[in-house]
Amino acid sequence: MTAQKGKDLLVKIADGAGFTTVAGLRTRRLSFNAETVDVTHAESANRWRELLDGAGVKRASVSGRGLFKDAATDALMRQTFFDGAVKNYQIVIPDFGTVQGAFQLTNLEFAGEHNGEVTYDVALESAGEMTFTAA
C-alpha cells in the first residue's frame, strides 16, 4: 500500500437505501483491539506468560471530527445517537479494503469558537462481528 490521502478514508452509515458518507469529517480514526486471556500457571516455561489462542473480546472503534456540511447525514447521525440505535457502518480504507459491521454511536460532541465554525466529534464502538472486504 502506497501513501494515501487522508480524505479518502471514509466513514459511511446505512441510510435505508444503502450507505452514505458521513459528511464534513476532517479527521477519522479506525482502531482494532483484542483482549487477551492469560492462562499462565505454575508449570509455565520459566514463568513466561501464556495466552489462550483465539480467546478474548475483539472490538473496533471509530472516531472522527468535522464540521456540519450535509443536513441529511447530520440529522441521521444526531437521531442515531439520541435513539441509542445500533446501525451498520462501512469504513473505507483506500487501496486496502472496507470494514463493515454494526456500531453504536457512543459520543457526539459539539464545539465552536466565536470566530469559527461549529464542529463536532463522534465516537463509534462495534456492536457485533466485523467483516473485511479487500479492495
Image (cartoon, rainbow, N blue to C red):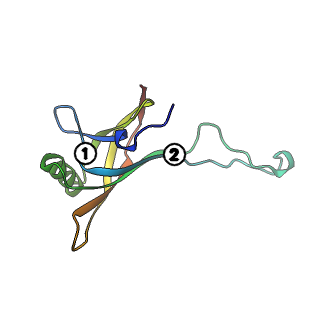
Q: Position of residue 72 (x, y in %)?
A: 13, 46
Q: Residues within 10 Å of mark 1 (few under 14, many from 20)?
A: many
Nearest to viewer (mark 1 / mark 2): 1
Q: Earlier in the sequence, mark 1 or mark 2?
A: 1
| Amino acid tagged 2 | Val
Determine whether the residue tagged by mark 1 lies in a helix, strand or loop.
Answer: loop
Q: Where the C terminus falls, by quadrant?
A: top left
Query: 50 and 109: which one is in front?
Result: 109
Determine whether the residue tagged by mark 2 lies in a helix, strand or loop.
Answer: loop
Image-quadrant location for residue 129: top left
At x 24%, y 55%, the residue is: 81
| Amino acid tagged 1 | Val
Q: Residue furthest right?
A: 46
Q: Position of residue 120 (x, y in %)?
A: 27, 60
Question: Does residue 122 appear to the left or right of 33 in the view shown?
Answer: left
State the CA–CA distance, disc 1 to disc 2: 28 Å
Disc number at residue 22?
1
At x 44%, y 37%, the residue is: 4
Q: Which residue is denoted by mark 2 in the rendering? A: 57
At x 26%, y 61%, the residue is: 119
Question: Does residue 91 appear to the left or right of 69 in the view shown?
Answer: right
Disc number at residue 2?
none
How many numbered discs, if any? 2
Q: Residues within 10 Å of mark 2 (few under 14, many from 20)?
A: few
In contact (CB < 8 Å): disc 1 and disc 2: no
Image-quadrant location for residue 21: top left
At x 40%, y 40%, the residue is: 5
Query: 47 and 3: which one is in front?
Result: 3
Query: 31 and 66: which one is in front?
Result: 66
